[in-house]
Amino acid sequence: MFLGVALGAFGSHALHGKISDHYLEVYKVGVIYHFIHALGLFAVAWLSTVSADPKIAVAGIFFVAGIIFFSGSLYALSITGIKWLGAITPLGGVSFLLGWGILIFSSYKTL
């Protein structure tokens, strides 16, 4: 969450007027997904206290991978304009989906 706040502030203040509006929006999408999945990590932490299912930790790993690949590639794409970085983004999206799927399946069995 700290990193999400720091990167959001950086994008809002340091990048405003330095990159195109399109890339600023791309950057913002990265920040939003970063925050959503950082909150998802709190769900993973809580579920880990009420369940011994090791798949819950795997969901957390997928969330972290998603933040790195999805949000990270959008941050880098926005700042550098290197278009091939956008090819990495779907790997992060799939990681997010796997993380949520595993978390839902594991929590359904737990709760």
Image (cartoon, rainbow, N blue to C red):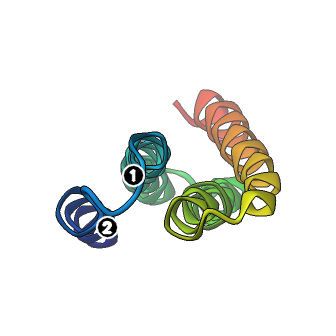
Residue under the point 44% across and 53% down: 34
Going from N to C along the chain, the mark reached first, 2 or 1, is: 2
Residue under the point 71% across and 34% down: 101
**Left or right for 45, reference 88:** left
In this rendering, is residue 110 above or below 81?
A: above
* Quarter of image, res 81: bottom right
Residue under the point 57% across and 68% down: 76
* Quarter of image, res 96: top right
In this rendering, is residue 58 above or below 51?
A: below
Q: Which mark is residue 31?
A: 1
Amino acid under label 2? Leu
Give x and y (percent) for residue 7: 31, 67
* Tally of numbered tags: 2
Element on which disc 2 rests: helix
Give x and y (percent) for residue 18: 33, 63
Element on which disc 1 rests: helix
- Labels 2 and 1 touching (C-beta < 8 A): yes
The residue that label 2 is drawn on is: 7
Q: Which one is nearer the viewer's eye here, 89 or 20?
A: 20
Q: Which mark is residue 70?
A: none
